[in-house]
Amino acid sequence: MANPKVFISSTCYDLRYIRENLKFFIKTMGFDPVLSEEGDVFYNPKEHTHDSCLDEIPNCQIFVLIIGGRYGGKYRNSDHSITNAEYKEAVKLKIPIFTLIAQDVYSDHHVYTRNSKNEHVDFSKIIYPSADNNMIFEFIDEVRKNTQNNAIVPFRNFIDIEDYLKKQWAGMMFSFLTKQNEEDRLIDTLSMLGNMNERIELLSKEILRSVGSDDSKITIKLYDEMIANSCISDLGLWEIKPSPAEILQYNSVDDLVSYFGQVIKIDEEEEGVTITHGRAELSKLKYEELSDCYQELREVMINILKKHNISVEEYTKNHE
């Protein structure tokens, strides 16, 4: 069974104890930690070691970013750090990112932000107790200003990190299971709607044509009877979807099928229903059931018209 891989991105020297604790914590969660100093990254002899780290990120499902007080070495041929380059790669790949910042660095960032628009402040002369480079703050801003995947949480010690990741990963699992249940319910709903689709198709044109009129109400009653009748489903197998007026107009199912350009053929040896091009093949028993069902449907529909003092001729003429 494949386990999720968690890429740990941070400067190594100053955060080595954090990284070591993270390694064991991730293992206890049943995940596989990926740390460059542990040999988890394949350093391709034909590539720069920086690129090898980036090449490993697509193989991971979770990205943990730890920002401490050291900016770290710069990624080759760029002005940003190796950790920043790893973060950019995770963002590009849309991997879930969990960002934690040392509390003292977070506090210094607050001071940096409060004074960033102060024209009287010379940032080059400010010494921050917990950060060795102002670019750390720019990195924090880059994470914070992303439109998504941009949560940042400060930590005082590893216990804070452990508690936060436990809650977040439990929430991620809950979200996954909830979404899966919602998808299952959606499939069930779509299945139900699929059964209703024919009714919606049959009713929509009529409702749009004469919303609220007595005529439309009668037509809806006729469609209700049609949808509830099995012969309409059988006719649908041959792409025959008659209107109430068409059923009332034709006395037999043979005449109706003929109107739609098809022919019913009775197969004495066939027990079910077979669809062929341009004709319907039915067993004798199935044909008799279809004919009887069609006649019963017509009688029910005619009785509906009678209750409203409407003749078949009058209704069909109004719905030509």
Image (cartoon, grey):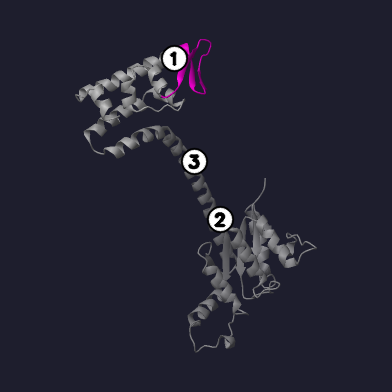
Q: Position of residue 202 (x, y in %)?
A: 36, 33
Residue 72 placement, left or right of 123: right
Q: Which residue is mark 1?
A: 287
- Amino acid type, callout 2: Trp
Quadrant for the N terminus in the image: top right
- Amino acid type, callout 3: Asp
Separation of residues labelled 3 and 1 (CA atoms) = 38 Å
Q: Position of residue 310 (x, y in %)?
A: 21, 24
Q: Earlier in the sequence, mark 2 or mark 3?
A: 2
Separation of residues labelled 2 and 3 (CA atoms) = 23 Å
Q: Quadrant of residue 108?
A: bottom right
Q: Earlier in the sequence, mark 2 or mark 1?
A: 2
Can see residue 10?
Answer: no
Placement of 228 over or under 130, stated as above or below: above
Local crowd at mark 1 within 10 Å, few (<14), some, or many (≥20)?
A: many
Q: Position of residue 130 (x, y in %)?
A: 59, 79
Q: Secondary structure at mark 3?
A: helix
Q: Which residue is mark 2?
A: 169
Q: Which residue is mark 3?
A: 184
Q: Secondary structure at mark 1?
A: helix
Q: Earlier in the sequence, mark 3 or mark 1?
A: 3
Camera-nearest residue between 272 and 175: 272
Camera-nearest residue between 239 and 117: 239
Residue 117 placement, left or right of 7: left
Whether residue 196 is in magenta: the answer is no
- Amino acid type, callout 1: Tyr
Residue 105 placement, left or right of 228: right
Which residue shows up at 36% across the image and 18% down it? 294
| Magenta-tinted stretch | 260-286
Which residue shows up at 34% across the image and 25% down it? 246
Which residue shows up at 55% across the image and 70% down it? 142
Placement of 207 over or under 228, stated as above or below: below
